[in-house]
Amino acid sequence: MSEEKQNNNQLPTSAITNQSSSTSEYWFEYPVRAQPHHTDYLGVVWHGTYIAWMEEARVECLRSIGVEYADLVALGCDLPVVELSVRYHRSIHLGMVAVVRTRMLEASGVRIDWEYVIDSPDRQDLYVTAKVTLVAVDRERGKILRQLPANVQDVLAKISASLNK
């Protein structure tokens, strides 16, 4: 934990400086391997790949507790990213294995914050830290909701309960 706190002190933006504010110590872990299509011509993982991996981890985290993202969409609520803050600490290269760790920090109003750490399987090398904020949007009207629909609130309560065990 002290190593994680040291790394958080080195983060440059306010959006990711406040990491680990959740009382939960639970992290969902999603292993990835850098494939050729993830890298540039030098075999270094392209910066956008990390963001794709984070989204995959978030969707799989939800699936692991029985929440299919498609079911959220079927409820008439989309959850687009409205804020993204990423700190790249070290590059991942072709063939390397990493673990994307994620957790939902908070659901406040129509905003939902997720935290990410991408590191080596042994946690000795930190590659990326990030925070993503999603906002609930009415799919039909394309407008930000004033409040979450009751059925979406129920889903978020389930997520929060599962992740904060």
Image (spheres, rainbow, N blue to C red):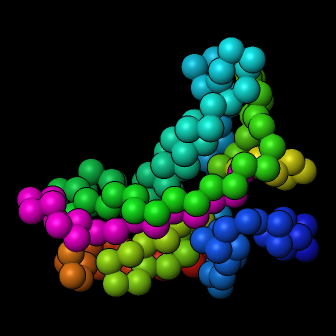
Report x, y in % for residue 41.
68, 14
- The residue positioned 83% from the left and 72% from the top of the image is 9
Residue 130 drawn in magenta:
yes
Q: Is residue 73 above or below residue 90?
A: below
The C terminus sits in image quarter: bottom right
| Residue 107 falls in image quadrant | bottom left
| Residue 115 falls in image quadrant | bottom right
Q: Is residue 46 above or below residue 111?
A: above
Residue 107 drawn in magenta:
no
Report x, y in % for residue 125.
86, 48
Q: Which residues are magenta?
A: 128-144
Point out the residue furthest to the left here: 140
State the residue in front, 65 or 22. Answer: 22
Report x, y in % for residue 7.
84, 65
Judged left or right of residue 78, residue 116 is right
**Is residue 59 in view?**
yes
Q: Is residue 56 above or below residue 103?
A: above
- Badge count: 0
State the residue in front, 3 or 143. Answer: 143
- The residue positioned 34% from the left and 58% from the top of the image is 80
State the residue in front, 16 or 70. Answer: 16
Report x, y in % for residue 94.
74, 23
The N terminus sits in image quarter: bottom right
**Is residue 151 in view?**
no
- The residue positioned 40% from the left and 58% from the top of the image is 81
| Residue 71 falls in image quadrant | bottom left
- The residue positioned 46% from the left and 63% from the top of the image is 83
Judged left or right of residue 119, residue 26 is left
Please name the predominant secondary structure of the magenta segment in the image. Answer: strand
